[in-house]
Amino acid sequence: MKIRITRETLMDGSLRARQLQLAAEHPDTRWRTEAEMAALMNGILAEHRAGEDLHVFGYGSLIWNPAFDYADRKTALLRGWHRRFCLKMIMGRGTREMPGLMLALDHGGACKGVAFRIAGEKVRQELSILWQREMFGCSYHARWVTVTAAGGEKIRAVTFVINRQHPRYLPELSVEQTAALIATGSGDLGTCREYLENTIAHLAQLGLKDAGLQRIAKALPKPL
């Protein structure tokens, strides 16, 4: 069954229902409860002044499919973390038999992406939508970071980084190994190839490049 990540599927519960169905099919995979997710979101918001705007830093599919309401966005640089295909996917964009790969932020280096500004009065609602998307599985941690926008403006933002203790975290992958998994990874949400190509294309629209993603794209076998 194909399903899309949209504002509607996040808000009406259909994406959540599909996630729960997949969770039942993978009982050995750990999932966060609603109570756990609420506690994690409250922990993030405890470090944010109520009523003020909040920024979210996107580096992958959030750039081209945010699905949450934002007031504006601007390109920004995050230091200390880099964008990497390091999360093995056995659902969504992969299966147990033919796993795919997903992007996450891993330690070291730097990453150019997008800082989205959520209006203060909408922070809890829009962050709840993001939480349904990013925090149901245990593969990501939410954390505060500081990014630098054009002109040197420093912006405090929430982003989602890899959980290095997660069993599907892959610390060591060559360009060729990464390309091989992306070439075959496919699932309910589509293919890993389109995920990579969308990320590269939308970065380019913003005047941004990621040399690591470009190397992976060049190593991909041509589609049949």
Image (tube, rainbow, N blue to C red):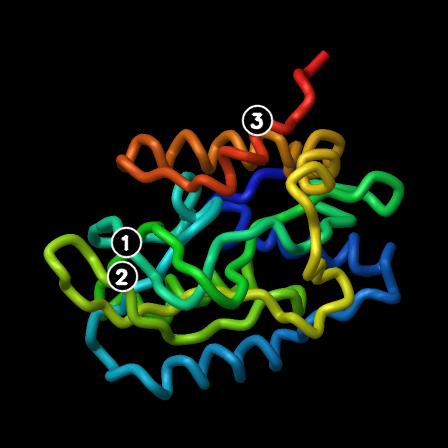
* Residue topped by disc 3: 218
> What amino acid is labelled 1 in the image?
Tyr
Against 40, residue 72 (above or below) is above
CA neighbours of label 1 inside 10 A, class few (<14), some (14 to 19), many (20+): some
Q: Which mark is residue 70?
A: 1
Task: Report how far apart the C-alphas of labels 1 and 2 lie in the structure.
Answer: 5 Å
Task: Report how far apart the C-alphas of labels 2 and 3 lie in the structure.
Answer: 36 Å
Task: Report how far apart the C-alphas of labels 3 and 1 lie in the structure.
Answer: 34 Å
Residue 73 percent location from the top left of the image: 24, 50
Q: Earlier in the sequence, mark 3 or mark 1?
A: 1
Q: Secondary structure at mark 2?
A: strand
- Find out whether the residues at labels 2 and 3 contact each other: C-beta distance under 8 Å: no
- Find out whether the residues at labels 1 and 2 contact each other: C-beta distance under 8 Å: yes
In the displayed structure, does residue 102 sit left or right of residue 57?
A: right
Q: Residue at x 61, y 49 (%)?
A: 85
> What amino acid is labelled 3 in the image?
Lys
Q: Earlier in the sequence, mark 1 or mark 2?
A: 1
Q: Residue at x 32, y 39 (%)?
A: 208
**Residue ranking furthest to the top:** 224
